[in-house]
Image: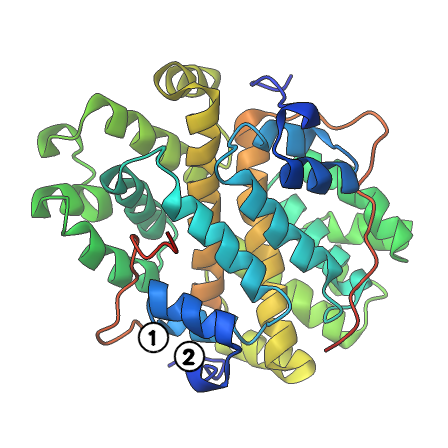
Amino acid sequence: MSRIPLTSIEQQPEPVRQWMARRGNLNVFRLLANAPHVFPGWTQMVDELFDSPTFSRRMREVVILRVAHLQNSRYELGQHIAIARGGLTDQQISAIVETEDFDAAGFSPTECTALDVTTELCTTHRLRDDTFAAAQAVFGDEALTELLMIISCYYGLALVLNAVDLDVDAQARFRPRGGAQ
Amino acid sequence: MTRIAYREPEAMTQQARELTNARGNLNVYRALGNAEKVFTGWMVAGNAALTSPVLPVRLRELVVLRTAYLMDSPYELGQHRDVARTAGVGSDEISAILSESDWKEGSFNPTERTVLQLATELLTTSSVEAETFDSVHTALGSEATVELLMVISRYAGLALMLNALDVDLDESARLPIPPRREPS
């Protein structure tokens, strides 16, 4: 049961209502909208992360699911397992959030590199030289930094969600393709 | 030594360049500026957090320092020691926050102490005891509690990026604290 009351969508200013209509009328947004001085800036950040063509939707979901699992975020898992089913097999999802047997699940080498970076960073808070070098060789500076932005966003968000003990939405799902354009 | 080349402000879009320059053109921004498709949104979100009138700057900086310490981020510690001093945090208080438990005994008021307790639980266990959460929520109200959690969220995530890229602390440049917006 959420430890902070959720705002009502009807009482949001028009731009926030429109944003939620695009991205989903989710509990997480109704929670964060309690902080109207910072919520609109946060939504712009989320839009850029999901509208960017740098990574495939599948790659983003691989990373987000891994962060959600390592941060033990019931809410992120609840949302993103459902979203990931559109592009990942059950075996792949279970490898990310349960068995960790990435080799048997048929991930691409690039996905495996992203999973290695995510796991090491979330569990040790840093990257060894060889892990960093391998990731830089695969992704280059721009995509590697953007990968870190995705990890950073979901690692931090998990803390908010866990602290508040936010309930997973019964039906509503986040829309990764809910960009304005 | 920073593991990637810096993106200089001249090579950024106008909005990203303006935000970077307004925040002191720090190494952190020139490193993250490499992610040019998402950097502007990240900067806009940060600006909103830094200019919001909701959390007292002193309380915010206590939490940033505690987060930097628990996430083991030398860069955040290097920058925010000085920001915290400017926000009225004493040297003894900074030492207490940057220790395992001295902050429980220090000169902090009850609200500050319960906020530090929440940050500590959250960053070491990924969750918060109901009692701790309730005391923060009662002291701050819903809006400031959500902002507080967003501050922890942002600086915890940023610590991962800074550590991953091993960003060097700026020699002398420090984050200028922008004026706060008027309460709405």
Identify the residue at image location x=44%, y=85%.
Answer: A10
Identify the residue at image location x=72%, y=40%.
Answer: B18
The answer to whether one can see residue B120 in this image is no
Badge 1: how crowded within 10 Å, few (<14), some, or many (20+)? some
Measuring from the top left, give residue A124's x and y in whole percent: 47, 36
Query: Label 1: chain?
Result: A
- Which residue carries the number 1 mark? A167
Residue in the foreground of this view, choosing between B24 and A93: B24
Residue in the foreground of this view, choosing between A3 and B21: B21
Measuring from the top left, give residue B127's x and y in whole percent: 46, 63
Q: Is residue A90 above or below residue B130?
A: above
- Going by the numbered disc 2, the residue's amino acid type is Ser
Q: In the rendered image, which quarter is residue B11 located in?
A: top right
Identify the residue at image location x=26%, y=66%.
Answer: A173
Q: In the rendered image, which quarter is residue A162 located in?
A: bottom left
Query: Dividing the image into 4 quarters, which one contains the N terminus of chain B?
Result: top right
- Per the rendering, the mark at residue A2 is 2
Measuring from the top left, give residue B130's x and y in whole percent: 49, 77
* 1 and 2 marks in contact (CB < 8 Å): yes
Classify mark 1: helix, strand or loop. loop
Classify mark 2: helix, strand or loop. loop
Query: Label 2: chain?
Result: A
Residue in the foreground of this view, choosing between A171 and A130: A171
N-term mark: 1 or 2: 2
Q: Is residue A36 above or below residue A133?
A: below
Q: Is residue A124 above or below residue B86?
A: above
Measuring from the top left, give residue B82's x and y in whole percent: 85, 43
Label 1 and label 2: CA atoms lie apart by: 6 Å
